[in-house]
Image (cartoon, coloured by chain):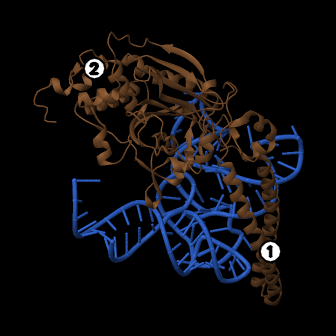
Amino acid sequence: MLDGRYLRENLEAVRTAMGKRAGDWDFDRFMALDDERRTLIQEVEGRQALRNEASKRIGEMMRAGDHDEAEVVKAEVRQLNDELQELDERLQSTEVAVRELLLRIPNIPDESVPIGDDESDNVEIRRVGEPPAFDFEPVAHWDLGPALGAIDFERGVKLAKSRFVVLGRDGARLNRALINFMLDTHGARGYTEWSVPAMANEETLTGTGQLPKFAEDLFHTDEGLYLIPTAEVQLTNLHRDEVLEAADLPLRYCAYTPCFREEAGAAGRDTRGMIRVHQFDKVELVKFARPENSMDELEAMVTDAEHILERLGIAFRTIVLCTGDMGFGAAKTYDIEVWLPSYNDYKEISSCSNCGDFQARRASIKFRSPGEFKGSRLCHTLNGSGLAVGRTLVAVLENYQQADGSVVVPEVLRPYMGGQEVILPVVAREGDGS
RNA sequence: GGAGGGGUGGCAGAGUGGUUGAAUGCGGCGGUCUCGAAAACCGUUUAGCGGGCAACCCCCGCUACGAGGGUUCGAAUCCCUCCCCCUCCGCCA
Protein backbone atom coordinates (compact mmCIF):
# COMPACT_ATOMS: atom_id res chain seq x y z
CA MET A 1 0.00 0.00 0.00
CA LEU A 2 1.21 3.47 -0.80
CA ASP A 3 0.77 6.44 1.47
CA GLY A 4 -2.43 8.14 0.35
CA ARG A 5 -1.16 11.57 1.29
CA TYR A 6 2.10 11.03 -0.56
CA LEU A 7 0.19 9.80 -3.58
CA ARG A 8 -2.13 12.79 -3.50
CA GLU A 9 0.75 15.25 -3.34
CA ASN A 10 2.94 13.50 -5.92
CA LEU A 11 0.34 12.08 -8.25
CA GLU A 12 2.05 12.77 -11.58
CA ALA A 13 5.47 11.73 -10.33
CA VAL A 14 4.08 8.42 -9.08
CA ARG A 15 2.10 7.86 -12.26
CA THR A 16 5.30 8.31 -14.27
CA ALA A 17 7.48 6.19 -11.99
CA MET A 18 4.91 3.41 -12.02
CA GLY A 19 4.71 3.19 -15.80
CA LYS A 20 3.00 0.07 -17.08
CA ARG A 21 3.11 -1.43 -13.65
CA ALA A 22 0.01 0.41 -12.50
CA GLY A 23 -2.05 -1.33 -15.18
CA ASP A 24 -5.52 0.17 -15.28
CA TRP A 25 -5.26 1.61 -11.79
CA ASP A 26 -7.34 4.77 -11.83
CA PHE A 27 -5.32 7.70 -10.51
CA ASP A 28 -8.04 10.22 -11.33
CA ARG A 29 -10.70 8.24 -9.54
CA PHE A 30 -8.46 8.08 -6.51
CA MET A 31 -8.06 11.85 -6.46
CA ALA A 32 -11.79 12.44 -6.81
CA LEU A 33 -12.64 9.96 -4.05
CA ASP A 34 -9.97 11.31 -1.76
CA ASP A 35 -11.16 14.89 -2.25
CA GLU A 36 -14.65 13.77 -1.38
CA ARG A 37 -13.39 11.90 1.64
CA ARG A 38 -11.59 14.90 3.05
CA THR A 39 -14.53 17.20 2.46
CA LEU A 40 -16.84 14.80 4.27
CA ILE A 41 -14.43 14.47 7.17
CA GLN A 42 -14.51 18.19 7.69
CA GLU A 43 -18.30 18.30 7.59
CA VAL A 44 -18.66 15.39 9.97
CA GLU A 45 -16.08 16.58 12.43
CA GLY A 46 -17.52 20.10 12.48
CA ARG A 47 -20.89 18.73 13.53
CA GLN A 48 -19.31 16.39 16.06
CA ALA A 49 -17.55 19.33 17.66
CA LEU A 50 -20.89 21.16 17.90
CA ARG A 51 -22.54 18.13 19.43
CA ASN A 52 -19.80 17.62 22.00
CA GLU A 53 -20.05 21.23 23.05
CA ALA A 54 -23.84 21.09 23.30
CA SER A 55 -23.79 17.88 25.32
CA LYS A 56 -21.43 19.45 27.77
CA ARG A 57 -23.84 22.39 28.12
CA ILE A 58 -26.76 20.05 28.69
CA GLY A 59 -24.90 18.39 31.51
CA GLU A 60 -24.36 21.76 33.15
CA MET A 61 -28.02 22.74 32.71
CA MET A 62 -29.25 19.50 34.20
CA ARG A 63 -27.06 19.99 37.22
CA ALA A 64 -28.28 23.56 37.55
CA GLY A 65 -31.86 22.34 37.30
CA ASP A 66 -32.68 24.10 34.01
CA HIS A 67 -34.52 21.11 32.61
CA ASP A 68 -36.70 23.02 30.14
CA GLU A 69 -33.71 24.78 28.66
CA ALA A 70 -31.90 21.46 28.40
CA GLU A 71 -34.78 19.98 26.46
CA VAL A 72 -34.47 22.71 23.84
CA VAL A 73 -30.77 21.96 23.32
CA LYS A 74 -31.48 18.24 23.25
CA ALA A 75 -33.84 18.77 20.34
CA GLU A 76 -31.15 20.71 18.53
CA VAL A 77 -28.66 17.93 18.99
CA ARG A 78 -31.17 15.38 17.76
CA GLN A 79 -31.47 17.41 14.59
CA LEU A 80 -27.68 17.53 14.34
CA ASN A 81 -27.48 13.76 14.76
CA ASP A 82 -29.88 13.18 11.90
CA GLU A 83 -27.59 15.13 9.60
CA LEU A 84 -24.57 13.35 11.01
CA GLN A 85 -25.93 9.91 10.35
CA GLU A 86 -26.40 10.62 6.67
CA LEU A 87 -23.00 12.30 6.33
CA ASP A 88 -21.30 9.54 8.25
CA GLU A 89 -22.66 6.84 6.00
CA ARG A 90 -21.37 8.69 2.96
CA LEU A 91 -17.99 9.16 4.62
CA GLN A 92 -17.68 5.50 5.52
CA SER A 93 -18.48 4.27 2.04
CA THR A 94 -16.03 6.77 0.57
CA GLU A 95 -13.29 5.69 2.96
CA VAL A 96 -13.86 2.06 2.05
CA ALA A 97 -13.63 2.92 -1.63
CA VAL A 98 -10.37 4.83 -1.15
CA ARG A 99 -8.84 2.00 0.86
CA GLU A 100 -9.96 -0.63 -1.64
CA LEU A 101 -8.25 1.37 -4.36
CA LEU A 102 -5.07 1.89 -2.36
CA LEU A 103 -4.81 -1.82 -1.52
CA ARG A 104 -4.66 -2.61 -5.21
CA ILE A 105 -1.94 -0.27 -6.42
CA PRO A 106 1.48 -1.93 -6.69
CA ASN A 107 4.64 -0.62 -5.08
CA ILE A 108 6.72 2.08 -6.75
CA PRO A 109 9.89 0.62 -8.32
CA ASP A 110 13.20 1.78 -6.90
CA GLU A 111 15.18 4.16 -9.15
CA SER A 112 17.85 1.50 -9.62
CA VAL A 113 15.42 -0.94 -11.24
CA PRO A 114 15.76 -1.26 -15.03
CA ILE A 115 12.75 -0.10 -17.01
CA GLY A 116 11.09 -2.84 -19.02
CA ASP A 117 7.92 -4.64 -20.02
CA ASP A 118 8.55 -8.29 -19.24
CA GLU A 119 11.19 -10.87 -18.35
CA SER A 120 13.08 -10.19 -21.58
CA ASP A 121 14.12 -6.84 -20.10
CA ASN A 122 15.57 -8.32 -16.91
CA VAL A 123 19.30 -7.76 -16.48
CA GLU A 124 21.80 -10.45 -15.59
CA ILE A 125 24.07 -9.40 -12.74
CA ARG A 126 26.45 -12.34 -12.47
CA ARG A 127 27.00 -16.02 -13.17
CA VAL A 128 28.65 -18.34 -10.71
CA GLY A 129 29.90 -21.85 -11.46
CA GLU A 130 29.88 -23.81 -14.68
CA PRO A 131 27.03 -26.03 -15.87
CA PRO A 132 28.21 -29.66 -15.66
CA ALA A 133 29.66 -31.16 -18.84
CA PHE A 134 28.17 -34.66 -19.09
CA ASP A 135 29.83 -37.31 -21.23
CA PHE A 136 26.46 -39.01 -21.46
CA GLU A 137 22.92 -37.88 -22.12
CA PRO A 138 21.63 -36.40 -18.83
CA VAL A 139 18.21 -37.53 -17.67
CA ALA A 140 15.50 -35.10 -16.60
CA HIS A 141 14.36 -35.32 -12.99
CA TRP A 142 10.90 -36.53 -14.03
CA ASP A 143 12.58 -39.70 -15.27
CA LEU A 144 15.50 -39.73 -12.86
CA GLY A 145 13.39 -39.19 -9.73
CA PRO A 146 11.11 -42.20 -10.26
CA ALA A 147 14.07 -44.37 -11.28
CA LEU A 148 15.72 -43.55 -7.96
CA GLY A 149 12.51 -44.12 -6.04
CA ALA A 150 12.95 -40.53 -4.95
CA ILE A 151 9.95 -38.91 -6.64
CA ASP A 152 6.57 -40.55 -7.25
CA PHE A 153 4.35 -38.45 -9.47
CA GLU A 154 1.54 -40.98 -9.96
CA ARG A 155 0.96 -41.48 -6.30
CA GLY A 156 0.99 -37.74 -5.69
CA VAL A 157 -1.96 -37.53 -8.05
CA LYS A 158 -3.64 -40.50 -6.38
CA LEU A 159 -3.36 -38.98 -2.92
CA ALA A 160 -4.34 -35.45 -3.89
CA LYS A 161 -4.50 -34.36 -7.52
CA SER A 162 -2.27 -33.36 -10.38
CA ARG A 163 0.66 -31.09 -9.49
CA PHE A 164 1.16 -32.86 -6.17
CA VAL A 165 4.14 -35.16 -5.67
CA VAL A 166 5.27 -37.80 -3.22
CA LEU A 167 8.91 -38.05 -2.23
CA GLY A 168 10.18 -41.48 -1.25
CA ARG A 169 13.23 -43.09 0.29
CA ASP A 170 16.39 -41.16 -0.51
CA GLY A 171 14.26 -38.46 -2.11
CA ALA A 172 12.51 -37.84 1.19
CA ARG A 173 15.82 -37.95 3.05
CA LEU A 174 17.48 -35.62 0.59
CA ASN A 175 14.60 -33.20 0.95
CA ARG A 176 14.95 -33.24 4.71
CA ALA A 177 18.72 -32.89 4.43
CA LEU A 178 18.32 -29.82 2.25
CA ILE A 179 15.92 -28.19 4.69
CA ASN A 180 18.24 -28.78 7.62
CA PHE A 181 21.31 -27.70 5.69
CA MET A 182 19.64 -24.46 4.66
CA LEU A 183 18.32 -23.65 8.12
CA ASP A 184 21.63 -24.43 9.79
CA THR A 185 23.56 -22.40 7.26
CA HIS A 186 21.35 -19.34 7.56
CA GLY A 187 21.23 -19.73 11.32
CA ALA A 188 25.01 -19.60 11.45
CA ARG A 189 24.90 -16.43 9.39
CA GLY A 190 22.65 -14.56 11.80
CA TYR A 191 19.11 -15.54 10.91
CA THR A 192 16.78 -16.46 13.76
CA GLU A 193 14.78 -19.60 13.07
CA TRP A 194 11.00 -19.78 13.46
CA SER A 195 8.32 -22.39 12.98
CA VAL A 196 5.01 -20.87 11.96
CA PRO A 197 1.44 -21.92 11.06
CA ALA A 198 0.83 -23.17 7.53
CA MET A 199 -2.48 -21.36 7.55
CA ALA A 200 -3.06 -17.66 7.84
CA ASN A 201 -6.07 -15.39 8.18
CA GLU A 202 -7.24 -12.64 5.88
CA GLU A 203 -5.62 -9.84 7.83
CA THR A 204 -2.25 -11.55 7.62
CA LEU A 205 -2.49 -12.10 3.87
CA THR A 206 -3.56 -8.49 3.42
CA GLY A 207 -0.56 -7.31 5.43
CA THR A 208 1.92 -8.78 2.98
CA GLY A 209 -0.15 -7.97 -0.11
CA GLN A 210 -1.51 -11.33 -1.29
CA LEU A 211 -5.00 -10.09 -0.54
CA PRO A 212 -7.25 -8.63 -1.72
CA LYS A 213 -5.87 -8.68 -5.24
CA PHE A 214 -4.55 -12.22 -5.59
CA ALA A 215 -7.10 -14.38 -3.81
CA GLU A 216 -7.34 -16.74 -6.80
CA ASP A 217 -3.71 -17.78 -6.26
CA LEU A 218 -4.43 -19.10 -2.78
CA PHE A 219 -5.98 -22.26 -1.41
CA HIS A 220 -8.50 -21.40 1.25
CA THR A 221 -10.50 -23.20 3.88
CA ASP A 222 -13.87 -22.23 5.16
CA GLU A 223 -13.66 -20.19 8.37
CA GLY A 224 -11.66 -17.62 6.41
CA LEU A 225 -8.25 -19.25 6.61
CA TYR A 226 -5.80 -19.64 3.75
CA LEU A 227 -2.90 -22.01 3.18
CA ILE A 228 0.24 -19.90 3.07
CA PRO A 229 1.88 -19.46 -0.35
CA THR A 230 5.19 -18.65 1.35
CA ALA A 231 6.53 -18.27 4.89
CA GLU A 232 7.08 -14.63 4.03
CA VAL A 233 3.52 -13.86 5.05
CA GLN A 234 3.97 -15.36 8.49
CA LEU A 235 7.48 -14.11 9.22
CA THR A 236 6.60 -10.59 8.11
CA ASN A 237 3.32 -10.53 10.00
CA LEU A 238 5.03 -11.70 13.18
CA HIS A 239 5.55 -8.01 13.85
CA ARG A 240 2.26 -6.72 12.49
CA ASP A 241 0.91 -3.92 14.70
CA GLU A 242 4.19 -3.71 16.56
CA VAL A 243 6.76 -1.01 17.16
CA LEU A 244 10.32 -2.36 17.04
CA GLU A 245 13.38 -0.87 18.70
CA ALA A 246 15.80 0.76 16.26
CA ALA A 247 18.70 -0.83 18.14
CA ASP A 248 17.34 -4.29 17.30
CA LEU A 249 17.30 -3.65 13.56
CA PRO A 250 17.89 -5.24 11.23
CA LEU A 251 16.00 -8.33 12.34
CA ARG A 252 16.90 -11.40 10.29
CA TYR A 253 14.48 -14.32 10.34
CA CYS A 254 14.24 -17.66 8.58
CA ALA A 255 11.72 -20.46 8.55
CA TYR A 256 11.02 -23.71 6.78
CA THR A 257 7.40 -24.26 5.74
CA PRO A 258 5.40 -26.03 3.11
CA CYS A 259 3.98 -23.56 0.59
CA PHE A 260 0.68 -23.88 -1.24
CA ARG A 261 -0.18 -22.24 -4.52
CA GLU A 262 -3.21 -22.60 -6.69
CA GLU A 263 -1.17 -21.81 -9.83
CA ALA A 264 -4.44 -20.77 -11.44
CA GLY A 265 -2.79 -18.74 -14.16
CA ALA A 266 -0.10 -21.30 -14.97
CA ALA A 267 -2.10 -23.97 -16.80
CA GLY A 268 0.18 -25.60 -19.33
CA ARG A 269 3.39 -24.17 -17.89
CA ASP A 270 6.06 -26.50 -16.48
CA THR A 271 3.61 -29.38 -16.58
CA ARG A 272 6.30 -32.06 -16.41
CA GLY A 273 8.15 -32.82 -13.24
CA MET A 274 8.01 -31.05 -9.91
CA ILE A 275 9.10 -27.57 -10.95
CA ARG A 276 5.62 -26.11 -10.58
CA VAL A 277 3.43 -27.91 -8.04
CA HIS A 278 0.64 -26.97 -5.68
CA GLN A 279 2.63 -27.82 -2.56
CA PHE A 280 6.36 -27.41 -2.11
CA ASP A 281 8.82 -26.87 0.70
CA LYS A 282 10.74 -23.65 1.07
CA VAL A 283 13.16 -22.05 3.48
CA GLU A 284 12.36 -18.37 3.62
CA LEU A 285 14.41 -15.37 4.69
CA VAL A 286 12.81 -12.19 6.00
CA LYS A 287 14.34 -8.97 7.28
CA PHE A 288 13.07 -5.86 8.99
CA ALA A 289 15.39 -2.94 8.32
CA ARG A 290 15.70 0.79 8.69
CA PRO A 291 14.81 2.56 5.45
CA GLU A 292 18.33 3.87 4.83
CA ASN A 293 19.79 0.36 5.14
CA SER A 294 17.25 -1.71 3.28
CA MET A 295 18.97 -1.74 -0.11
CA ASP A 296 22.24 -2.89 1.45
CA GLU A 297 20.31 -5.53 3.36
CA LEU A 298 18.79 -6.73 0.09
CA GLU A 299 22.25 -7.21 -1.42
CA ALA A 300 23.29 -9.15 1.68
CA MET A 301 20.20 -11.30 1.51
CA VAL A 302 20.89 -12.22 -2.11
CA THR A 303 24.41 -13.18 -1.09
CA ASP A 304 23.01 -15.37 1.69
CA ALA A 305 20.69 -17.16 -0.72
CA GLU A 306 23.44 -17.57 -3.33
CA HIS A 307 25.67 -19.00 -0.61
CA ILE A 308 23.47 -22.10 -0.41
CA LEU A 309 24.00 -22.89 -4.08
CA GLU A 310 27.71 -22.16 -3.82
CA ARG A 311 28.05 -24.62 -0.96
CA LEU A 312 26.05 -27.17 -2.95
CA GLY A 313 28.33 -26.58 -5.91
CA ILE A 314 25.60 -25.92 -8.44
CA ALA A 315 25.84 -23.28 -11.19
CA PHE A 316 23.52 -20.31 -11.06
CA ARG A 317 23.06 -16.77 -12.25
CA THR A 318 21.52 -13.76 -10.59
CA ILE A 319 19.32 -11.27 -12.41
CA VAL A 320 17.59 -8.07 -11.42
CA LEU A 321 13.96 -7.92 -12.47
CA CYS A 322 12.82 -5.01 -14.62
CA THR A 323 9.90 -2.78 -13.67
CA GLY A 324 7.45 -4.86 -15.71
CA ASP A 325 8.39 -8.22 -14.21
CA MET A 326 8.43 -7.42 -10.50
CA GLY A 327 5.89 -8.69 -8.02
CA PHE A 328 3.13 -6.55 -6.58
CA GLY A 329 4.77 -5.42 -3.35
CA ALA A 330 8.39 -5.20 -4.41
CA ALA A 331 10.44 -2.05 -4.87
CA LYS A 332 13.35 -4.10 -6.17
CA THR A 333 13.78 -7.81 -6.82
CA TYR A 334 16.67 -10.12 -7.62
CA ASP A 335 16.00 -13.60 -8.89
CA ILE A 336 18.53 -16.37 -8.52
CA GLU A 337 18.28 -18.95 -11.28
CA VAL A 338 19.80 -22.40 -10.97
CA TRP A 339 21.17 -24.45 -13.84
CA LEU A 340 18.85 -27.31 -14.81
CA PRO A 341 20.07 -29.79 -17.43
CA SER A 342 16.48 -30.78 -18.24
CA TYR A 343 15.67 -27.21 -19.25
CA ASN A 344 19.16 -26.66 -20.67
CA ASP A 345 18.77 -23.28 -19.04
CA TYR A 346 18.68 -21.43 -15.76
CA LYS A 347 15.44 -21.68 -13.76
CA GLU A 348 14.24 -19.51 -10.89
CA ILE A 349 15.06 -20.96 -7.49
CA SER A 350 14.96 -17.83 -5.35
CA SER A 351 13.42 -14.41 -5.45
CA CYS A 352 14.69 -11.74 -3.08
CA SER A 353 12.80 -8.48 -2.72
CA ASN A 354 12.94 -5.24 -0.86
CA CYS A 355 9.36 -4.16 -0.29
CA GLY A 356 10.32 -0.81 1.21
CA ASP A 357 7.53 0.45 3.47
CA PHE A 358 4.80 -1.06 1.26
CA GLN A 359 4.06 -4.03 3.52
CA ALA A 360 4.96 -2.16 6.69
CA ARG A 361 2.26 0.40 5.97
CA ARG A 362 -0.36 -2.29 5.37
CA ALA A 363 0.68 -4.29 8.40
CA SER A 364 1.68 -1.36 10.61
CA ILE A 365 5.26 -2.42 11.36
CA LYS A 366 7.21 0.46 12.80
CA PHE A 367 10.36 1.23 14.69
CA ARG A 368 11.23 3.87 17.24
CA SER A 369 14.44 5.49 18.30
CA PRO A 370 14.02 7.75 21.34
CA GLY A 371 16.45 10.62 21.21
CA GLU A 372 16.84 10.33 17.46
CA PHE A 373 13.28 11.15 16.46
CA LYS A 374 9.91 11.47 18.12
CA GLY A 375 7.22 8.86 17.65
CA SER A 376 7.73 5.95 15.29
CA ARG A 377 8.43 5.35 11.62
CA LEU A 378 7.64 2.57 9.18
CA CYS A 379 10.21 -0.19 8.79
CA HIS A 380 11.28 -1.61 5.48
CA THR A 381 10.59 -5.30 4.97
CA LEU A 382 12.54 -7.72 2.80
CA ASN A 383 11.99 -11.33 1.88
CA GLY A 384 13.77 -13.97 -0.14
CA SER A 385 13.79 -17.69 -0.76
CA GLY A 386 16.72 -19.36 0.78
CA LEU A 387 15.91 -21.56 -1.18
CA ALA A 388 12.92 -23.27 -2.76
CA VAL A 389 13.63 -26.78 -1.49
CA GLY A 390 11.77 -28.74 -4.17
CA ARG A 391 13.58 -27.02 -6.99
CA THR A 392 16.87 -27.40 -5.14
CA LEU A 393 16.24 -31.13 -4.85
CA VAL A 394 15.61 -31.26 -8.59
CA ALA A 395 18.81 -29.29 -9.21
CA VAL A 396 20.84 -31.66 -7.05
CA LEU A 397 19.47 -34.76 -8.77
CA GLU A 398 19.96 -33.43 -12.26
CA ASN A 399 23.36 -31.79 -11.78
CA TYR A 400 24.90 -34.61 -9.74
CA GLN A 401 23.66 -37.55 -11.84
CA GLN A 402 26.12 -40.16 -13.09
CA ALA A 403 26.25 -42.23 -16.25
CA ASP A 404 25.12 -45.32 -14.31
CA GLY A 405 21.90 -43.62 -13.21
CA SER A 406 23.07 -42.90 -9.68
CA VAL A 407 23.34 -39.47 -8.05
CA VAL A 408 26.28 -38.29 -6.00
CA VAL A 409 25.28 -36.60 -2.76
CA PRO A 410 26.92 -33.15 -2.49
CA GLU A 411 29.57 -33.08 0.24
CA VAL A 412 27.78 -30.54 2.40
CA LEU A 413 24.65 -32.69 2.54
CA ARG A 414 26.34 -35.96 3.55
CA PRO A 415 26.37 -35.15 7.28
CA TYR A 416 22.63 -34.69 6.97
CA MET A 417 22.20 -38.10 5.31
CA GLY A 418 24.14 -40.24 7.70
CA GLY A 419 27.27 -40.00 5.60
CA GLN A 420 25.57 -41.37 2.50
CA GLU A 421 27.62 -40.53 -0.60
CA VAL A 422 25.47 -41.74 -3.44
CA ILE A 423 21.83 -42.36 -4.28
CA LEU A 424 21.34 -45.55 -6.26
CA PRO A 425 18.60 -46.46 -8.74
CA VAL A 426 15.91 -48.75 -7.36
CA VAL A 427 16.90 -51.66 -9.63
CA ALA A 428 20.45 -51.61 -8.31
CA ARG A 429 19.30 -52.09 -4.74
CA GLU A 430 18.27 -55.19 -2.86
CA GLY A 431 15.14 -55.72 -0.82
CA ASP A 432 13.74 -52.42 -1.93
CA GLY A 433 10.18 -53.51 -1.29
CA SER A 434 8.70 -51.14 -3.84
C1' G B 1 -17.99 -29.91 22.56
C1' G B 2 -20.14 -28.44 27.93
C1' A B 3 -19.89 -24.88 32.34
C1' G B 4 -17.97 -20.47 34.37
C1' G B 5 -14.70 -15.97 34.45
C1' G B 6 -12.41 -11.99 31.81
C1' G B 7 -10.76 -8.35 27.79
C1' U B 8 -9.00 -0.46 30.04
C1' G B 9 -2.78 3.39 28.25
C1' G B 10 4.50 -0.15 27.69
C1' C B 11 3.01 -3.28 32.19
C1' A B 12 -0.02 -3.70 36.69
C1' G B 13 -4.64 -1.89 38.05
C1' A B 14 -9.00 1.88 39.36
C1' G B 15 -13.20 3.53 37.13
C1' U B 16 -21.22 1.36 36.41
C1' G B 17 -24.10 7.35 32.22
C1' G B 18 -21.78 13.65 32.31
C1' U B 19 -16.34 18.39 31.64
C1' U B 20 -12.18 10.84 32.19
C1' G B 21 -7.79 10.27 27.00
C1' A B 22 -8.94 8.05 31.32
C1' A B 23 -7.00 7.75 39.15
C1' U B 24 -2.86 5.22 41.33
C1' G B 25 1.65 2.26 41.08
C1' C B 26 5.69 0.43 38.05
C1' G B 27 8.50 1.25 33.84
C1' G B 28 10.36 5.04 30.25
C1' C B 29 12.05 10.13 29.29
C1' G B 30 13.85 15.13 31.14
C1' G B 31 15.58 17.71 35.45
C1' U B 32 17.29 18.80 40.72
C1' C B 33 20.89 16.63 43.99
C1' U B 34 25.94 13.93 43.35
C1' C B 35 32.88 13.52 41.61
C1' G B 36 29.65 9.76 39.37
C1' A B 37 25.76 6.41 40.41
C1' A B 38 21.82 4.86 43.57
C1' A B 39 18.03 6.80 46.60
C1' A B 40 14.86 10.91 47.12
C1' C B 41 12.23 14.90 44.95
C1' C B 42 10.00 17.78 40.61
C1' G B 43 8.14 17.47 35.75
C1' U B 44 6.77 14.52 31.61
C1' U B 45 4.76 10.22 29.14
C1' U B 46 -0.74 6.97 23.46
C1' A B 47 -2.12 6.37 18.44
C1' G B 48 -4.82 7.35 13.81
C1' C B 49 -7.21 10.94 10.84
C1' G B 50 -8.59 16.07 9.15
C1' G B 51 -7.27 21.18 9.20
C1' G B 52 -3.73 25.37 10.14
C1' C B 53 1.37 26.43 8.81
C1' A B 54 6.80 27.67 4.10
C1' A B 55 7.55 23.44 7.32
C1' C B 56 7.48 20.79 11.90
C1' C B 57 8.91 16.56 16.75
C1' C B 58 4.16 23.13 16.93
C1' C B 59 -1.32 24.72 17.23
C1' C B 60 -6.77 23.47 16.62
C1' G B 61 -10.50 19.67 15.91
C1' C B 62 -12.33 14.58 15.52
C1' U B 63 -11.88 9.44 16.68
C1' A B 64 -10.09 5.35 19.73
C1' C B 65 -11.02 1.75 26.81
C1' G B 66 -11.13 -6.33 22.15
C1' A B 67 -14.47 -5.62 17.21
C1' G B 68 -19.20 -4.22 15.25
C1' G B 69 -24.14 -2.47 16.13
C1' G B 70 -28.03 -0.30 19.59
C1' U B 71 -30.13 3.02 23.68
C1' U B 72 -29.12 8.38 25.07
C1' C B 73 -28.41 15.29 24.37
C1' G B 74 -24.07 12.48 26.24
C1' A B 75 -21.18 5.54 27.16
C1' A B 76 -14.99 2.82 29.23
C1' U B 77 -19.61 2.68 32.06
C1' C B 78 -26.47 0.12 29.93
C1' C B 79 -28.30 -3.64 25.80
C1' C B 80 -27.24 -7.10 21.45
C1' U B 81 -23.85 -9.87 18.16
C1' C B 82 -19.01 -11.51 17.17
C1' C B 83 -13.68 -12.36 18.26
C1' C B 84 -9.94 -13.54 21.69
C1' C B 85 -7.90 -15.12 26.51
C1' C B 86 -8.22 -17.87 31.29
C1' U B 87 -10.23 -21.97 34.66
C1' C B 88 -12.79 -26.72 35.18
C1' C B 89 -15.02 -31.08 32.59
C1' G B 90 -15.12 -34.10 28.09
C1' C B 91 -12.26 -35.61 23.74
C1' C B 92 -7.60 -36.12 21.54
C1' A B 93 -2.01 -36.11 18.39
Q: Residues within 10 Å of mark 1 (few under 14, many from 20)?
A: few
What is the chain letter for disc 1?
Answer: A
Q: Earlier in the sequence, mark 2 or mark 1?
A: 1
For this rendering, which residue is in front, A241 or A155?
A155
The residues tagged by marks 2 and 1 sit, at their Cα atoms, a distance apart of 75 Å
Q: Residues within 10 Å of mark 2 (few under 14, many from 20)?
A: many
For this rendering, which residue is in front, A9 or A314?
A314
- What amino acid is found at the position of numbered circle 2 in the picture? Val
Residue A420 location, quadrant = top left
Residue B84: image location, x then y, percent:
44, 60
Chain in brown, by letter, is A
Figure quadrant of the N terminus of chain A: top right
User: Is residue A304 visible to the viewer in this orientation of the structure?
Assistant: no
- Residue shown at 51%/30% (left/top)? A351
Residue named by callout 1: A83
Chain in blue, by letter, is B
- Residue shown at 80%/62% (left/top)? A40
Q: Tell me: residue A388, above or below residue A70.
A: above
Residue A262: image location, x then y, percent:
46, 46
Residue named by callout 2: A409
Residue A39: image location, x then y, percent:
83, 59
Residue A418 location, quadrant = top left
Residue A411: image location, x then y, percent:
29, 16
Tag 1 secondary structure: helix
What is the chain letter for disc 2?
Answer: A
Give the mark toward the camera: 2 or 1. Answer: 2
Tag 2 secondary structure: loop
Figure quadrant of the C terminus of chain A: top left
